[in-house]
Image (cartoon, grey):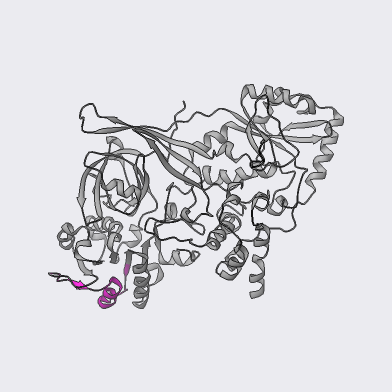
């Protein structure tokens, strides 16, 4: 039988190298492609995504949340939600999965240069911002002041807590918040948009990058507009149900745009030009 | 230089027989039961070919099977470490050369939409590409329009030869067949004897007559701006599709509808990753694992279908409409929703605002 020269539907086989329990329903997987040369040559932009395969169950899309500047493994954080994520959560170190990556567009890292950066994350929405944050720490001189407002329902629902010290020592001002009071919690209390308003960062030479649940995004956008952020100063990532991941199967469109190839990263300026069907 | 041949009515079977020795020949066949009507199947000796009516289902499945295997996989014990498994993954496919005989211009035009998406996008679909390269189209000039046909309204027509390799013109006592390109020319010797000047002249006149016909009333090719103007008019969309039962037949029979799903099927340690036709009319099509659905209501799903064909697609691909005007969605719709009417009335709101 003839072999395909290239096949975007064929995943690379990969091995789970490490698993980190982030929260009660989020695991982080560190994955290495079995083909050593492909692993060495693998290149991507912060914010690009990958399709993880559990053969026999299916595929789901996750952001590559390790930065391209750190290539020992590719990291994906997976919240247990549907069939594929359920099975991923049952996997062990050494188990085999498939990876189709990189897919999608990634963050505009050059456009962000020479700006102060305001990250605003909610829950698992921290994953795509982590890759960009670490990329900036590894290219620290290209970027100005970095602030991260990161919220979750409870202290137990915050991801990557074991890295907070590294982020702080890299010069990130970390503003943590949870939805309500918890014993021993000494950081902020309140929803992310409220904390944003309290912090009131200046929009001067600043770019805001936000990711989180739709309801959070909605109020964060309102908050940023009140702080005089222009539409082009706001960058977010979208989520849609995806299958092919390569702009063909049809389901992730918003008007003429396909989130899998035109996104998942969009500026608020671009979002406002799309049909209102998020 | 005449490369026109003639196939007499009575010789058709013998011609198909000869062709089918060299390749898979797909022909429109009437199914015994009422459920299926006419659809394209591989020719064999007992096949009764129906060329005097449009098929119920076009030849979409020839280049885009309703279900096809993308990958096959097998979990195997790791010989070095019995506590581990590794995966054997295969993605090959074996495609034989094929001929679609007796499709109509609208059916063939459907694949022009596929070509844009599967071959000219940022990624090439290798499964479609292999089939496309190996498949020829001997297309029948269409002289059997009905009240649901509107091919001329979308920039095509009953004499549209775009996308075909051979062109078949029915004359009283048989068919005059002409090659339209090099690929088609190679089949001419297998197909029949040189046509007489009288037969060629007769065919020429029929082609001229049929090509001059305008099938369909409106021009629906310039609706992109009107669609945008109507997008947020919820009353319009609710009114237009209140009858819709979200059955998805419009997408199933549509020659330009290419949306698909990917699912895994496995048994024991082996399995396959399958691609199958999907439909944007279904609630589950866009339902996310979180429970969020960007198009939860049927009017939103129908609006996306109309937008995709008459606005999003032409905006993306140089004005090309992803509707071939075959009328199958109108004929098959159990509640008789008429896409021509939906697109036609888009305009009024925009005009009214001016």
Could you tell me which quadrant the N terminus of chain B lies in?
top right
Residue sitting at the far right: B198
Q: Within the magenta stretch, is there residue A232? A: no
- The spot of residue B12 in percent (x, y) is 75, 27
Instruction: Please indicate whether residue A191 sits to the left or right of residue B39 in the image.
Output: left
* Residue B197 shows up from this direction: yes
Residue sitting at the far front: B33
Instruction: Please indicate whether residue B115 sits to the left or right of residue A43 in the image.
Output: right
In the depicted structure, whether residue B226 falls above or below residue B214: below
In the depicted structure, whether residue A135 falls above or below residue B14: below
- The spot of residue A4 in percent (x, y) is 45, 32
Q: Quadrant of residue B38?
A: top right
Magenta residues, start to end: A184-207
* Residue at 23% from the left image edge and 26% from the top image edge: B79
- The spot of residue A94 in percent (x, y) is 22, 38
* Residue at 34% from the left image edge and 33% from the top image edge: B268
Could you tell me which quadrant the C terminus of chain B lies in?
bottom right
Q: Within the magenta stretch, is there residue A195? A: yes
- The spot of residue A213 in percent (x, y) is 34, 64
* Residue at 39% from the left image edge and 72% from the top image edge: A230
- The one of B271 and B135 positioned closer to us in this rendering: B271
Q: Quadrant of residue B158?
A: top right
- The one of B301 and B113 positioned closer to us in this rendering: B301
* Residue B233 shows up from this direction: no
| Count of residue discs | 0
In the depicted structure, whether residue A234 falls above or below residue A46: below
- The one of B224 and A57 positioned closer to us in this rendering: A57
* Residue at 22% from the left image edge and 69% from the top image edge: A178
């Amino acid at each position: 039988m003839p072999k395909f020269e290239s096949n975007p539907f064929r995943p690379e086989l990969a091995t789970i190298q490490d698993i980190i329990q982030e929260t009660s329903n989020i695991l982080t997987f560190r994955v290495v492609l079995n083909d050593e040369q492909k692993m060495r040559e693998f290149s991507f932009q912060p914010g690009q995504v990958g399709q993880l395969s559990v053969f026999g169950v299916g595929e789901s899309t996750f952001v590559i949340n390790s930065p391209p500047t750190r290539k020992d493994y590719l990291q994906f954080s997976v919240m247990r939600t549907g069939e594929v994520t359920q099975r991923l959560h049952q996997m062990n170190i050494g188990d085999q999965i498939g990876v189709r990556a990189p897919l999608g567009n990634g963050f505009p890292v050059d456009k962000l240069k020479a700006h102060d950066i305001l990250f605003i994350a909610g829950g698992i929405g921290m994953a795509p911002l982590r890759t960009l944050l670490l990329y900036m720490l590894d290219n620290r001189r290209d970027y100005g002041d970095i602030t991260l407002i990161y919220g979750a329902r409870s202290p137990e629902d915050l991801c990557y807590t074991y890295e907070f010290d590294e982020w702080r020592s890299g010069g990130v001002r970390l503003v943590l918040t949870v939805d309500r009071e918890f014993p021993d919690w000494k950081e902020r209390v309140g929803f992310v948009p409220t904390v944003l308003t309290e912090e009131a960062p200046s929009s001067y030479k600043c770019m805001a990058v936000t990711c989180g649940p739709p309801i959070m995004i909605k109020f964060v956008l309102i908050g940023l507009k009140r702080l005089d952020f222009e539409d082009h100063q706001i960058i977010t990532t979208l989520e849609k149900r995806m299958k092919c991941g390569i702009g063909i199967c049809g389901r992730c469109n918003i008007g003429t745009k396909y989130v899998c190839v035109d996104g998942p990263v969009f500026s608020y300026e671009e979002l406002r030009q799309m049909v209102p069907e998020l | 230089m005449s490369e026109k041949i003639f196939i007499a009515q009575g010789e058709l079977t013998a011609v198909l027989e000869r062709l089918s020795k060299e390749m898979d020949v797909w022909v429109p066949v009437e199914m015994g039961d009422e459920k299926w009507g006419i659809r394209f199947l591989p020719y064999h000796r007992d096949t009764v070919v129906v060329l005097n009516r449009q098929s119920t289902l076009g030849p979409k499945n020839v280049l885009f099977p309703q279900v096809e295997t993308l990958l096959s996989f097998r979990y195997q014990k790791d010989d070095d470490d019995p506590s581990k498994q590794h995966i054997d993954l295969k993605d090959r496919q074996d495609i034989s050369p094929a001929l679609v005989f007796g499709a109509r211009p609208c059916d063939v035009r459907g694949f022009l939409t596929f070509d844009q998406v599967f071959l000219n996008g940022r990624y090439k679909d290798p499964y479609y590409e292999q089939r496309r390269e190996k498949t020829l189209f001997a297309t029948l000039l269409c002289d059997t329009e009905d009240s649901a046909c509107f091919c001329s309204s979308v920039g095509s027509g009953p004499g549209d030869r775009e996308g075909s390799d051979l062109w078949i013109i029915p004359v009283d006592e048989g068919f005059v067949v002409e090659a339209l390109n090099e690929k088609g020319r190679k089949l001419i010797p297998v197909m029949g004897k040189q046509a007489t000047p009288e037969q060629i002249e007769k065919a020429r006149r029929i082609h001229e007559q049929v090509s001059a016909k305008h099938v369909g009333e409106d021009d629906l090719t310039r609706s992109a701006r009107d669609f945008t103007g109507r997008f947020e008019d919820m009353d319009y969309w609710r009114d237009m599709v209140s009858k819709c039962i979200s059955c998805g037949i419009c997408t199933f029979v549509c020659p330009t509808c290419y949306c698909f799903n990917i699912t895994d099927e496995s048994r024991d340690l082996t399995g396959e990753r399958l691609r199958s036709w999907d439909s944007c009319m279904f609630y589950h099509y866009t339902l996310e694992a979180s429970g969020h659905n960007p198009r939860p209501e049927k009017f939103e799903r129908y609006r996306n279908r109309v937008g995709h064909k008459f606005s999003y697609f032409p905006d993306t691909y140089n004005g090309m409409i992803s509707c071939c005007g075959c009328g199958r969605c109108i004929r098959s719709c159990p509640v008789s929703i008429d896409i021509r009417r939906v697109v036609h009335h888009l305009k009024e709101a925009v005009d009214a605002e001016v």
